[in-house]
Amino acid sequence: MAAFKVTIANTGAVIDCDANQRILHAAVGAGVDFPYGCATGNCAACISDLTAGEVAMMSYSDNALSVAQLADGKILACRAKPLSDVAVTWLGRGRK
Ligand code: FES
């Protein structure tokens, strides 16, 4: 499975994320203190701006991410698998 590079703008970390791996899991596994709660697409704690690249979103609750937010470039890191090298900025914790 191909590994993509994920840049996490909040910390400057650049991590590897397999195509079948969720960005949140790759980040936490790499020691990044990425904000999250449910890790199942229901709470929105991991909501992030996707500032470069493309992801595939697994199923999630519309309450956590609206159609309008998705169209505006927001993703849920716990439900997003990379389709390319990507860059994200988490929006929780006041964009630390
Ligand atoms: S951690 Fe709850 S929606 Fe991602």
Image (cartoon, grey):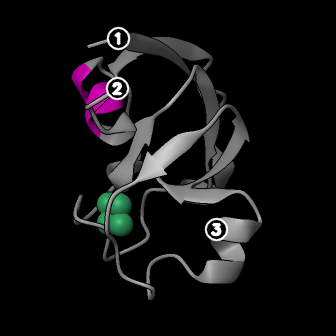
Left or right of residue 89: residue 20: left
Kind of residue at badge 1: Ala
Q: Which mark is residue 70?
A: 3
Which residue corresponds to mark 2?
Answer: 19
- Numbered label attached to residue 2: 1
Identified by mark 2, the residue type is Ala
Q: Secondary structure at mark 1?
A: loop
Q: Quadrant of residue 15?
A: top left
Left or right: 52 as drawn, with respect to 2 = right
Q: Which residues are magenta?
A: 25-29
Report helix, strand or loop for mark 2: loop
Tell me, yes or no, if residue 92 can be seen here.
no
Q: Nearer the viewer, mark 3 or mark 2?
A: 2
Q: Name which residue lies at 53% across and 15% down.
A: 13
Mark 3 vs 2, N-terminal side:
2
Percent x, y of residue 33: 37, 34
